[in-house]
Image: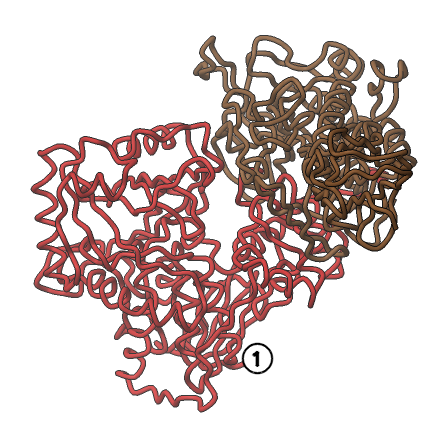
Chain colours: A red, B brown
Amino acid sequence: MKKYDVIIIGAGIIGCMIARFLSRYKLDTLLIEKEADVCMGATAANTAIIHAGYDPVPGSLKAEMNVKGNKMWDTLAGELNIPFERRGDYVVAIGEEELPKLEELMKQGIQNGVPGLVLLSGDEVRRREPNINPKVSGALWASTGGIADPFAAAVAAAENAVMNGVTIMFETVFQDFIMDGNKIVGIKTNRGDFASRWVINAAGLYSDEVMHKAGVRPEFRITPRKGEYYVFDRAEITINNVLFPVPTPVTKGILVTTTIHGNTIIGPNAKDIQDKEDRSVTREGLEEVWNGALKLVPKLELKHVIAVFAGLRAGGNAPSPNPNIKYNHDYVIEIPSNVKGFVNLGGIESPGLVSSPAIATRVIELLKDVGEKLEEKKDWDPIRPARPRFRDLSKEEQRILVQNDPRYGRIVCRCESVTEGEIVAEIHAPVPAKTYDAIKRRTWLGTGRCQGGFDTPRVVEILARELGVPPTQITKKGPGSEFLKRRTKDVA
Amino acid sequence: MSLDRVKPIYDVVVIGSGPGGLGAAIAAKKNGADDVLIIERDNELGGILVQCIHNGFGVEIFKEDLPGPLYAHRFIQEANSLGVEVLSDTMVLDITPLRKITAVGKRAGFVELEARAIVLAMGCRERTRAQIRIPGTRPAGIYTAGTAQRFVNVEGYMPGNRFVILGSGDIGMIMARRLTLEGAKVERVLEIMPFLTGLTRNYVQCLLDYNIPLQLRHTVSRILGNYRVEAVEAVEVDENWNPIPGTEEIIPCDTLLLSVGLIPENELSRKAGVILDPITGGPVVDESMQTSVSGIFAAGNVVHVYDLVDWVTEAGFLAGKSAAKFAVEMKKGLSRKVKLVAGANVRYIVPQYLDSESLAESDQRIQLRVVRPIEEKVWVEVTDGEHLITRKLERYVRPGEIVTIKIPKKAYDEVQKTDKLIVRVAKS
């Protein structure tokens, strides 16, 4: 049985980020993921905002991780070479009656230690965002808010981890712990058993089931909370700012924002559901999101929508570790006292993306606190080099790239200008992209207005060629999602 | 029809080699354009015709019922014999209003060139699931009819075994038949409108003849299945296209094909600053198919979606002819002015300048007066400073009488090489 120092369950943004920060130390680390790629759970569909931190309840672990995490993103983005823009965000009050909420939020932000909060007048907001509802009465501007690409962040973190010696296994499903008394000594998976001194629960939506198998927090429950979104054609409408409505006690509300790729997106609503795999978009949900977004930007038009999608938040029910506050949806980041060899995480919903580097750092602190000797590798390389993105280059750079490798001259996705060279590079990257969606998440191919209609047959062909398998084995997102059933002349 | 070297400037560049682009390139050549280039993103010419292996093409133009690839082939051959140049496997990245084109290809590399006139012939693309916002999951097994057609007819693969087709457009109905012939089961064609949206002949030949049921006033209200489509939920709609509760029906299937409309493809037109019609989605054009940007023309489904390919070809003919005319005019405008210099014993010459291109069409007559009289036979000579271009013998010259001399057409080549012509009237 292969023996590791650390096994991380789940390759969402949290698992990938922990793997990356742990890769600094002399540890034999394994990251397992039940799906065919990184970030296929909660990380796959969210608003991609690097929250400033005025929103979480003061004193909560959520607030602490948010504010700490926010400060780490400049360095993180630089080291991992991932897109990140600190363009600030706005909480927008519509009508005079919403104005007092802005002041409350600002106070809360100051309590949380959020720098750079400014209240703006309605006139100032209209100047900054001409598309906004003219009835805007004011806004809270959080200058440290930002936008990022969660896929790029998770992929880059995982890649940097692999570069520094971490092993990743996909389509590897955690089944149970191997215990020695109250000490975890390994895990059972569909691909066999693996021994380990430590197991880290980063299973996201399934974190409750994992911790229950270890006998930890039997009362803890993840309730998937669905959020639905629309994506707009960037040629038709551009909103330059991140616009939140004033929040309700349950959610930050339906916002209008831009992705780092320039598409306006609206969403999410918030609906508690039972099924942890139900990412279906509903008619009612879409209607709710539409009406919510119109409150902020009345000029949105349905005909400019190029995609709709839904994501699930891994909402938990853990009371805050801070005894001074009463809050029952806090993050769990702990080494439980009743089980040895277990780092337990749970309920990492929004603002999980922004918090992820702070959570990874906290996990390392916890390990050090219990006496784990973490010895730094001398040759740890925090830099994950970026691969060329054809569409972001100048003409001269494009010319040189094509000259050196003609595969960068073949555009496979015309809407987003993604080339064969980029696709091939992703297929053979340290964390290889072996499905259509994996390539899509890394290159942004197929996300434009034709939604893959043009590129799909070409990507299937390239994947089959590069992986050395027949096209019928190429999948959208792992086994069971094959694109093609058979050759035409084969019998059905 | 391959190309070793791309020229820096062409009379007419056609973007796209579907029926509109081929028609435009042929017409441009036939109407006086010298250098005509087609830029095609695919390996082969013909655009979407390549995958349309069914018949129904050419009835208007050839009075024959041809399959798509054969229809395309006729025009490809004609373009070839006319000397149209082709850059295939090459994607145009950018067009400027000054008609500078940037393109890139695996074999062609990074290409920058200029066109005196451009014909936009990029065709159209299919509306997607998102544009009609079908609720449900996002599994594999949802294809636009055209993408499925490419898989089956070009790549040779079946994208599914059990199909539901949404939309009674022509591609959807043609694919229903095609998939049935390949051994798949087409459960149903659903159409949200109370009427067929494609041609009746396709309904008869593709659905009725194969016992494929068509349900009008029905749409897909939900897609089921996390990894692969497992079923769709069909529902009847009322006159406002809203689902009627209680009419939901789960249809098990592994693939949903969408044939829900086409949209002109105008990303490049936008980059060139061409004004688009919000209704058609295509460029606003005049009777010559010229867009709002002079020198940029458009033809075929890029302008509006046609129902017959023959008409796309005819639109291509018109746009190509207009583009050629524009390019030829432009070349005239671009020609150089050659100065006529008064040499020995010449006081002045009219005209003062000669358009270097003017000799391409006819002899050019110039008139002059001399400074001093010469009362004997004398040569009026036109030179470029070194070589004699033409001369004429006069019996005498006097300042009071205008002297006329023609610069002959045959001097065209020599005039191209100089920037001045010197006229002298003196005894040598």
Decide if residue B172 is on the left or right side of residue B67.
left
Residue A479, image x, y percentages: 62, 52
Front residue of A72/B274: it is: B274
Residue A66, image x, y percentages: 25, 62
Decide if residue A21 is on the left or right side of residue A68.
right
- Quadrant of the rendered structure where residue A323 is? bottom left
**Residue occupying the far front of the picture:** B375
Residue drawn at the location 45% of the way across and 74% of the way down? A7
Decide if residue A457 is on the left or right side of residue B394.
left
Front residue of B390/B26: it is: B390
Q: Residues within 10 Å of mark 1 (few under 14, many from 20)?
A: few
Residue drawn at the location 13% of the way across and 42% of the way down? A121
Residue drawn at the location 44% of the way across and 78% of the way down? A382
Residue drawn at the location 14% of the way across and 37% of the way down? A137
Residue to which mark 1 is pinned: A1
Image quadrant for the C terminus of chain A?
A: top right
Which residue type does callout 1 highlight?
Met
Is residue B11 something one can see in this rendering? yes
